[in-house]
Image: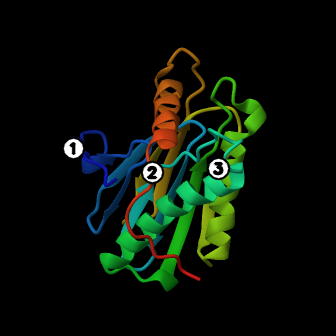
Amino acid sequence: MLAPNLYYDNHFELDAAKILPGEFYVTVRDMVLVTVLGSCVTACIRDRVSGIGGMNHFMLPDAHPEQESPASLSARYGAFAMELLINSLISLGARRSLFEAKVFGGGNVLPGLSTLNVGQRNADFAMNFLSAEGIDVVSQDLSDVYPRKVYYFPRSGRVLVKKLRSTHNETIREREIQYASRLVDEEVTGDVDLFG
């Protein structure tokens, strides 16, 4: 889903888009894309010449492993999120041959899910996907135990990452648990072009 949360960031003096789980945003304008990650992963991809860029935010589901393997669930939702971002960038005029990526998240922050390694699986998926697609990963901050707040400036490629070390804020955990529940109940729809 295209991120609907647009606002003006007074600190950076730029228009901004807040990306929530299951959302993405692409732009040709000079703006900042912001997300907060726990076990989710964000891929920030841009055309390094034109500055057309975007960000996604995905959590790969781990529910119902008795029905499907975690790997097939991961590929289903992770690939969908990545292809939406890539296709949207191309539709704005970005050239795939000039893509560069920065990848963040995959922390072990969800209680009760540490044995399933959700964050690490997300991080591994993103890196493997980008490698298979021939998209250079020029920066990454993956895994660990902390949530992260990420500010991405597609025009320049600049990224600011703040690790959220306070355990008093349960919002991130609650948001990811709710999103994981929705993924189990909702079927992915729409056309996705896979690049070989």
Q: Position of residue 74 (x, y in %)?
A: 63, 53
State the residue position of label 3: 122
Residue 35 x, y percent position in the rendering: 43, 43
Q: Is residue 22 above or below residue 132?
A: above
Q: Amino acid at mark 2?
A: Glu
Sequence-wise, the earlier of marks 1 and 3 is: 1
- Judged from this view, the residue extending furthest toward the front is 67
Q: Which mark is residue 194?
A: none
The amino acid marked with disc number 1 is Tyr
Ranked by sequence position, the earlier of labels 3 and 2 is 3
Gap between marks 1 and 3, in whole Å?
A: 30 Å
The residue that mark 1 highlights is: 8
Alpha carbon of mark 2 to alpha carbon of mark 1: how far?
A: 33 Å
Residue 143 in sight here: no
Q: Image point 63% across, 32% down: which residue?
A: 146
Q: Amino acid at mark 3?
A: Asn
Q: Quadrant of the C terminus?
A: bottom right
